[in-house]
Image: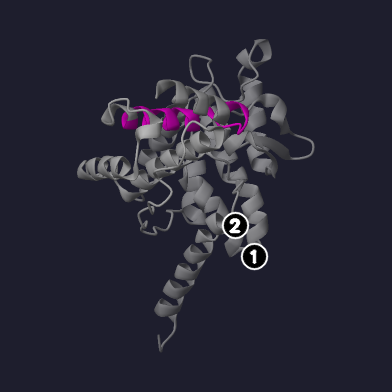
Amino acid sequence: MDRHIRKFLTYLEIERNASPHTLLNYHIDLKQMRQFLSGKDPQEIDRLDIRRYLAFLKSKNLKKRTLSRKLSTFRSFFRFLTREGYAKTSPVSAIASPKLEKTLPIFLDVNKVARLLEAPEEKQLLGLRDRAILETLYSTGMRASELIGLNIGRVDFIAGMVKVYGKGRKERLVPIGDKALRAIREYLEKDTFHKKDTRSLFLSKNNRRLTAAGVRKIINKYIQRTSLKEKISTHTLRHSFATHLLDKGADLRSVQELLGHASLSTTQIYTHITTERLKTVYNKAHPRA
């Protein structure tokens, strides 16, 4: 099965422009399935094999969302094999994905976002960098993976736009606010290493491109400093960005474009947040609620 997995990953990388993160997850999922099925040839794998493997995964107390993602991987893999003639039918086609529980994303109100953005001390280079990172995440709504891939040349200081490469390496232009641009400019003016070398906008203290783990560490540092009680992740500022735009009257299609969502249904979860907030305000304020 190894050669089929390699062909599939090559197809994803070259023809589908899959990101390194996506390729890694697909590779892990398929390698684990191969080990469970003892390297069985794809032609011999049937629906019972897939069900046995899913039951095994379920016994490991994996979350439904993880099971659904793995099943999606298998579905794409066998669809590729049948299309290329490596298998006659897909053993996954008739297997339904588990129903996922709908959870509303966590976001911060405007005052809490302001506390978080103002937490870095701007006397030192790393403080300037951290302030620029937090301002950029909230100003653009970009993902942490998009932030760490950002190069200096993709920020247009005159037009107030930033070129972002999202999932599937899809490119989009996103407006960036004056405060974020000012924070980036102050950081670059202080960091002389940028003048000598790299294209990367945000660097670690070792002058290398930041990693996703590095960004998480930075955000956790300021969560602790500001004593915010919410379970904040690198995605929280993105959720806050979208929620605040909708609260101020932005239309859903525009927010979808800014976030880089392929489907409007993905963006619609933020309308549930604003509806829940309206209900809370109504129940607290209305005498007959």
Contact check, label 2 and label 1, Cβ < 8 Å: no
Whole-percent x and y of residue 287?
A: 41, 87
Q: Which residues are magenta?
A: 13-33
Q: Is residue 158 above or below residue 280?
A: above
Find the residue positioned furthest to the top.
196
Mark 2 surroundings: few (<14), some (14-19) or many (≥20) residues within 10 A = some
Image point 62% across, 46% down: which residue? 260
Q: Is residue 124 visible?
A: no
Image point 39% across, 59% down: which residue? 102
Relative horizontal placement of residue 32, taking residue 189 as reference (left or right): left
- Examine the structure image and report whether residue 17 is included in the region drawn in magenta: yes
Whole-percent x and y of residue 50?
A: 32, 42
- Examine the structure image and report whether residue 15 is included in the region drawn in magenta: yes
Q: Quadrant of the C terminus?
A: bottom left
Image point 46% across, 35% down: which residue? 87
Relative horizontal placement of residue 248, taking residue 22 as reference (left or right): right
Quickly name the residue at label 1: 249
Q: Secondary structure at mark 2?
A: helix
What is the magenta segment's predominant secondary structure?
helix
Q: Amino acid at mark 2?
A: Leu
Q: Nearer the viewer, residue 96 or 170?
A: 96
Which mark identifies residue 264? 2
Mark 1 surroundings: few (<14), some (14-19) or many (≥20) residues within 10 A = few
Q: Quadrant of the N terminus?
A: top left
Relative horizontal placement of residue 24, taking residue 173 as reference (left or right): left
Whole-percent x and y of residue 283?
A: 41, 79
